[in-house]
Image (cartoon, rainbow, N blue to C red):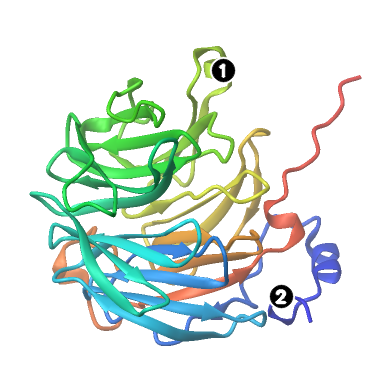
Amino acid sequence: MSLFGASPASTSASTANNTQGDLSKDVELAAPPEDSISCLSFSPQSEHLAVASWDSKVRIYEISETGQSMGKALYEHQGPVLSVHWSKDGTKVVSGGADKAARMFDVQSGQSQQVAAHDEPVRCVRMFQSPNAGEMLVTGSWDKTLKYWDLRQQQPAATVQMQERVYTLDVCQGLLVCGTAERYINVINLANPTVIFKTIQSPLKWQTRVVSCFPDATGFAVGSIEGRCAIQYVEEKNARFGWDFPFLVRIFGGLALPLSPPQMSIPVAGHAKSHLMILYRDKDAKHRLKGFPSVGGSIASTGFNRNGNIFAYAISYDWSKGHQANTPQYPTKVMLHPIKEDEAKPRPVAKKR
């Protein structure tokens, strides 16, 4: 049986010439969080999905081949959870929250413990492989610092001062990219993790919402709250290949753009007024691969599974209109979308005559 019971060959054939995507086979995650969803993260080793929420909990689900889900574990912070990420071997989950702490959950023992602390909320967490110290944790906070943690020790291995509050960060291979308030973007080579290799002002005019590193670590994508995305390269020699594009005319809330493994396309998710869409953009060819209809609410976070054949997107209130707009009727759910061949695969480049 193929993923979610759909036949990839027949589905691809029926939609090959259609730029409008189909969400009819998407499956809703069972027992979703009770409050707004802040972050999704798939395990790199298995079909498990971690979901962080403003209800102060991290939930871990197991996803079957048919798209069905089952809750496997849950642990708590003492405040809203803002970020979640898996260790490389898939045995641990780390999370950061408004309680100014990062916690680590051991999947095998079912136990969690605090592993990091800041003076303000921890906005971002990432596990990464250090060239010298094995797997480490990096945390970014509204206290304007990045901290590196050797999880065998209680104190941070190093602290790096940022210009402003940390809003987003991503790591891939030896590349770390951090986006802060006031549109600063800092690039760090993890071979020299305490030194900022390069600082740029975001090419986008409004506040940075999210950054996502290329799998080959040559550059990164940037998304901002006004609904634009930009492609940036680390080396100056490749700077001419950078570009940006609009998602929708205007976005009033969240934006998410993880890079798809292995196709290197960019799913952009967000909302303009009350119309919600997901778009795939081909990173190199600079054109839209597929668009999707409204999903009925703000898309707060997205993510691909390890094989790139499941795209998860969280629908929940994004707090863009304050607490008064967070009504009980607003949807809070995670949807699992089976990736069809024509949705995320880059189009072949036309040969010049």
- Residue at the outermost left position: 119
The N terminus: image quadrant: bottom right
* Residue 251 visible, this angle: no
* Residue 337 visible, this angle: yes
Q: Amino acid at mark 1?
A: Asn
* Left or right of residue 323, residue 125 in this image: right
- Callout count: 2
**Residue drawn at (61%, 80%) of the image:** 67
Residue situated in front as seen by the camera: 244 or 41: 41
Secondary structure type for disc 1: helix
Q: Tell me if mark 2 has few (under 14), some (14-19) or many (20+) residues whose alpha carbon lies within 10 angstroms of its own.
A: some
Q: CA distance from mark 2 to mark 1?
A: 38 Å
* Left or right of residue 190, residue 29 in this image: right
Residue situated in front as seen by the camera: 60 or 317: 60
**Residue receiving disc 1:** 238
Q: Amino acid at mark 2?
A: Leu
The C terminus: image quadrant: top right
- Residue at the outermost top position: 237
Secondary structure type for disc 2: helix
* Left or right of residue 242, residue 328 in this image: left
**Residue receiving disc 2:** 3
Residue 210 occupies quadrant: top left
**Residue drawn at (80%, 69%) of the image:** 8
Q: Tell me if mark 1 has few (under 14), some (14-19) or many (20+) residues whose alpha carbon lies within 10 angstroms of its own.
A: few
Query: Measured along the vertical axis of the image, is residue 245 above or below residue 261?
Result: above
State the mark number for residue 149.
Answer: none
Query: Measured along the vertical axis of the image, is residue 20 above or below residue 157?
Result: below
Query: Measured along the vertical axis of the image, is residue 150 above or below residue 99?
Result: above
Residue 145 occupies quadrant: top left
Mark 2 in CB contact with mark 1 (< 8 angstroms): no
Query: Measured along the vertical axis of the image, is residue 146 above or below residue 26?
Result: above
